[in-house]
Amino acid sequence: MVVDAATKFYATQSGSVHALDKVSIEVREGEFLCILGPSGCGKSTLLWAMGGLHDLTSGQIRLGEEVITKPHPEIAMIFQDANLLPWRNLAKNVALPFELKRKRPDMERIGRLLERVSLNGFENKFPRELSGGMQQRASIVRSLAVNPSVLLMDEPFGALDAFTRDEMNLLIQEIWMETGKTIAFVTHSISEAIFLADRVVVMSARPGRITAIYDIDVPRPRSVEIQTRPDFIERVLQVKARIDRGRITSDLAIA
Amino acid sequence: MDKVLGDKIPEFNRKQEADGPGLAGLSSFSLGSGRTHLETAVILLVAVVVIGGAELALRLFNVPQYILPKPSQIVSALFTEWPFLWPHLVTTLYELFVGFAIGGAIGFVMAAVITQFPFVEKVITPYILLLVTTPMLALVPLLILRFGFGSEPRIIAVALASGPMVMINSATGFRRVDLAKIALARSFGASTLQIFTKIRIPMAMPMIIVGLMVGSIFGLLTAIGAEMVGGAEGLGNRLTYYSALIRMPQFFAVILLLAIIGISIYVFFYWLGKKWANWEA
């Protein structure tokens, strides 16, 4: 998947906002890419554009040869706060993509996935009866159920507590290793990005542009404990310094 | 708040604060208000005490029937008068159903369409508010002049009274757009129609049901009022008839019937809400 000079302005009541400025990334096949940046840096805008939910002012997003201008069946999104439909039980939430595509739900695949994320037996529960982590696991199953080749995740674990978040990070790493999907994962947590990613793309705000790309060569599977290792922390500080520098310059530019 | 309570509070409860409840009192027919057996028993006990007390007091002080009939007289009047009452009941229910079906359908469709166009909505809302706040009963004499003493003027009045209520509440529901849920559906390739039927309508459903409930109660009110204004049929007409003849037990029997209709409407929509919109409880 290729993002080529993606530029986005959008109009608000207080004028035009320059959300993305000539952002170019290549998301390699089977790669786990994290897009990291402070809030308002346009990382979600970029991800939504990759999902075909926004158009760009200029530039292009391609999946293979195809230009993405609208949602693509090979691309599935996972949203903040799980985004389950509260009026549907778990089984019906997970079946939603099939319903929208007018296909019979692949019950066998759904069953296997639910079991994989330990949600089997909860099919008749409504979202309000599930914990935040369970809800997000359900939304992962919903996206994987239609077997896309690319997963776009928009700060999926931002609202979870630290323990659940660690659990989810481990789970998504395992799922990625098992399925070999291409994942682009937006987050504002530096340690989450470094923990998960093959490569971390750092973005700065106003306008959103790429300031650095880090290769993370920590061997997998990575355990939660590596986050407390000195070299891991060293990396986090390094990236943090980079982001702070970007912030200061963009703040100065505005002043 | 997101971060602290994130897991515990379903997305929707948070949304509600921003929108405010449409018609405050009536939207609080919140569904899971489970009563304990004790509470049910006390409610029944109060009914027994009030009705029994009234019966006793009226007997004790020898209150004449034409001032206030005894509960037992009212019930027996309902049975003895039933053969003469039921055609009027049918008339009233017919007017209510037809008028509400017309008004409710128009109100629902208008709400669904108008909320898609913020400009149109802003322009139309004051006029709808005018329809909601002006008692449509006031139009009945005029409608009778034009349509005669049959059911038509009342059906029109019922439609005019219930339609705007359905519309204004449904519109509140449709206005609660959750962009993330629409984006979710779009990301799986949903069409505009699918977004409407699978996201927008279910999301608006709690307020639609509130609108239907309020609308139908307003419709009942208007039907009865319209029947009191003119014509020779309907429960409203029976109220004026019996009171003119000072047949108070029969008069109160009609009121009892009206109360039963009203409660049935409430219970029906409560049940519908439990069935279709219980996720918001």
Image (tube, coloured by chain):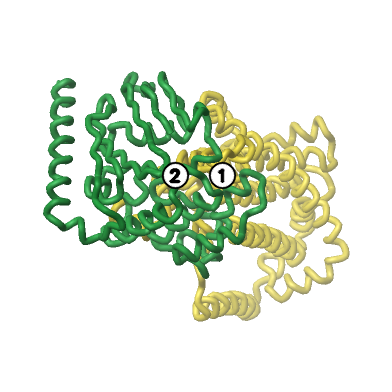
Chain colours: A green, B yellow
Going by the image, does B14 lie left or right of A41? Answer: right
Secondary structure, mark 2, is strand
Location of residue B18 by image quarter? top left
User: Is disc 2 in contact with disc 1, using a CB cutoff of under 8 Å?
Assistant: no
Give residue B99's quadrant in the image: top right
Same chain for the residues under marks 2 and 1 in the image: no
Q: Type of residue at label 1?
A: Ile
Q: Is residue A53 above or below residue B151?
A: above
Residue A133 place in picture, x, y as percent: 38, 59
Image side of residue A243 versus residue A34, left or right: left
Comparing marks 2 and 1, which lies closer to the viewer? 2
Disc 2 crowd rating (10 Å Cα; few below 14, some 14-19, many 20+) is many
Image vertical order of residue B120 relative to residue B191, above or below: above
Which residue is rendered at x = 60% and y = 79% of the image? Answer: B48
Q: Which residue is mark 1?
A: B199
Which of these two is toward me, A77 or A216? A216
Place of residue A32 in the rendered image (x, y in percent of width and height, measured from the top left): 35, 45
- In the picture, the disc for residue A151 is 2
Numbered label tally: 2
